[in-house]
Image (cartoon, rainbow, N blue to C red):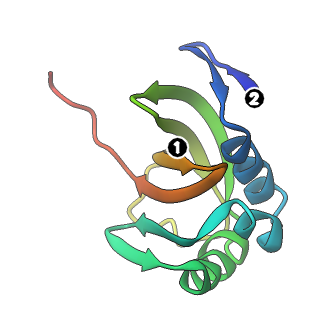
Amino acid sequence: MTTFTTAFTTTALPPVVAEYLAAVNAFDLDRMLATFAPDAYVNDARREINGIAAIRAWAAKEMIGDRVTMEPIEVVEHYGQTIVRSRYDGTYDKTNLPAELIMSDYFSVRDGKIVSLAVIRNQPSPY
């Protein structure tokens, strides 16, 4: 496991999640796709992307194509799910987005592969 330390927490990332982050930041589509199970799904911006072919199309355009980078700032392990909060940057359309875009990636891993990933722009809670 890769150990990730932030001002908030120290968490051991599952190896496949660490590899996903490294692949995204290296703009390496094939390496990124190798982290997913063939029948995985991604939910990004309330869109369901099912199966490796659809994930490839999404990643090629919206992750690798838009030169997305992720700078993790917090990692939380919660009942087997790994939540990575990151500063996102890239060449994507930033209209109506904050100067510092923080997104939460919710990873579910089985047998060493990502089986689901939800990418969410959360809002602060008043509670």
Q: Callout 1, which amino acid?
A: Glu
Q: Callout 2, which amino acid?
A: Met
Q: In this view, does 105 lie to the left or right of 87?
A: left
Q: Residue at x 55, y 28 (%)?
A: 75
Q: Foreground mark, 1 or 2?
A: 2
Q: Which residue is drawn at 46% across and 67% down?
A: 42
Q: In which quarter of the image is the C terminus?
A: top left
Q: How many residues crowd around disc 2 within 10 Å: few (fewer than 14), some, or many (20 or more)?
A: few
- Report the residue that reaches farthest toward the front: 111
Q: Residue at x 50, y 47 (%)?
A: 107
Q: Name the residue under label 1.
A: 100
When asked about the image quadrant of residue 53, the answer is: bottom right
Say what secondary structure mark 2 lies in: loop
- CB within 8 Å, label 1 to label 2: no
Alpha-carbon distance for marks 1 and 2?
Answer: 29 Å
The answer to which of 56 and 62 lies nearer the viewer is 56
Q: Is residue 79 left or right of residue 31?
A: left
Q: Which residue is drawn at 55% across and 27% down?
A: 74
Tell me residue 14's x, y (percent).
Answer: 66, 36
Q: How many residues crowd around disc 1 within 10 Å: few (fewer than 14), some, or many (20 or more)?
A: few
Tell me residue 118's x, y (percent).
Answer: 42, 56
